[in-house]
Image (spheres, rainbow, N blue to C red):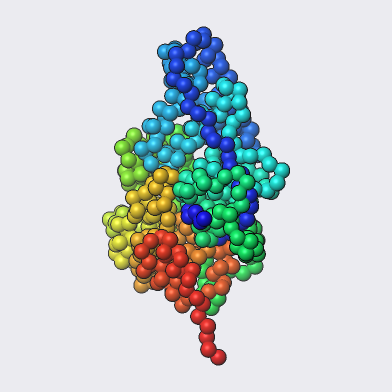
Amino acid sequence: MRISGIGIGRGVAVGVVARMSEPLGEPADVESDADPVEEYRRVERALRATAAELTERAGHADDEGREVLAAQALMAEDPAVIEDIESLIAEGKTAERAVFEAFRTFQRVLEPMGGYMAGRVADLRDVAQRAIARLRGVPMPGVPALDTPFVLVAHDLAPADTAMLDLEKVLAIVTRDGGPTSHTAILARSKGLVAVVGTADSDVLVNGSTVIVDAGAGQVVLDPAEAEIAAARAAGGRVHAVAPSSPGALKDGTRVALLANLGAPDEAADAVSLGAEGVGLLRTEFLYLDARQAPSVDLQRQRYTELLRAFGGKKVVVRVLDAGADKQLRFLGHTPEENPALGRRGIRALREHESVLRDQLSALAQAQNETDADLQVMAPMIADVDETRYFIELGREMGLAKVGITIEVPSCAVLADQVVPLCDFVSIGTNDLTQYTLAADRLLGSVAGYQDPWHPAVLRLVELVGDAGSAAGISVGVCGEAAADPLLAVVFVGLGVTDLSMSPTALAEVRETLAGVTLPEARSRAKAAVHATSAAGARAAAAAVLPRHRSR
């Protein structure tokens, strides 16, 4: 039996299934006969202990995991949630039921918002589960503690679980929920783990059964034949990132810049050690998200200069503040919206508060003048020519040498022949481009099957941008997580993409794959993919194109 999903990377692993234990059941909705004061004190102790546990785990996690776990610890002590719990207990609810209902209320508020906010629903659910387990005096459902290596199968993984995975024991991950940008997928990619997510039929995988997890094919093979097992073991498992000794290029010498996606200047050293030739996306939200007011120009200049000096002489693409949707900021006047992912986000919010944008551009221009890095600055969520022209002209007015846009709204890709010639460069954000093209929130497991950048509709939009970039003679980058898929990276190059930016740990594998194909071969794979009728068909078609052999 073969189970299909979304593969992360191209690794293959063979192992025995170990399932995560099922979540705790919903507490009974019965009237409590306990003292409300004592019930509330029990909740206080449980939430305090839960927050302490998450904080302790954060201390052992990497940068990304630390941030998520720290946010969860704050959720456990959120005054609004605690106030709701106290009210529910006063109404006669048990401690367990009050915790369940209070957190569920906040989950229901966040879920319709989509994007990042909807992704926090799983975090809230995990905090509630941990608190209820403490109230019941039972272990928290989690990753099995086994002495032998195993394939971990779960409905989904909470941040607290992913941050503490024993990579010596976990051979691969298979989840029922999630998409290519879920917590699980991001962890797998950053750790070089074999993973297949969004596998709707994974409930048939039982403890002790043998499986092959083939990320490249996006498949899990249940009870494989001996010959299949031997072939899978020969193919190898986890991909270990090794710093390359040469720049990214195709077999025929065609240069393809391989860059890193970074969330803060602190990540620069690791990216350099893993072979990043520069930065294809610096997300600047790290300066804003915890601030009650916009950071000063001087503070911004210092942090940008720090990063640019780490990549002296190399390309560094910085995206200005992408606020709104999942990142609500009061100093940008954000208020609740019915569908914030389609609301005042990105350039729309910045244009309404131009002083915030001007301060950021001023700081970037100063950092540019203090270093020798090739700074390139782009704006997010550009929809048309008007928004493109506005940002390009403002960036040049502020003294920036190279100004461009992120193409992640389908309208912008359709109008690529109009917007691209106005820019010094463009970069395609495949995460948002995919979710907007296919009307599928990238963090919702219920539509995970649509969240696939291999879909021909997405590839055809990339092709429009690639053609426009070639005609205008400017670089076209991809900075979404899709660039970390080695075969899809080849297809992107065949569609006219010149720069690929990804998680640093994916660089070595992508570089190796690109070195094995020529530009005509990449174009052949791209042509086969865009003429397919589905994401799975595009992936299969690209993989089926055989290398061309020159006659002697």
- Residue 326 in percent (x, y) is at 41, 41
Q: Residue at x 51, y 8 (%)?
A: 35
Number of numbered markers: 0
Nearer to us in this view, 200 or 317? 200
Q: In this image, 353 relative to 247: left or right?
A: left
- Residue 329 in percent (x, y) is at 40, 37
Q: Residue at x 43, y 45 (%)?
A: 445
Q: Is residue 222 visible?
A: yes
Outermost residue, left side? 386
- Residue 409 in percent (x, y) is at 34, 54
- Residue 484 in percent (x, y) is at 52, 59
Outermost residue, right side? 147
In the rendered image, the vertical position of residue 455 relative to residue 528, given as above or below? above
The C terminus sits in image quarter:
bottom right
In the rendered image, the vertical position of residue 105 relative to residue 188, given as above or below? above
In the rendered image, the vertical position of residue 487 relative to residue 74, given as above or below? below
Q: Is residue 475 visible?
A: no
Nearer to us in this view, 248 or 133? 133
Q: Residue at x 42, y 55 (%)?
A: 452
Q: Residue at x 59, y 24 (%)?
A: 134
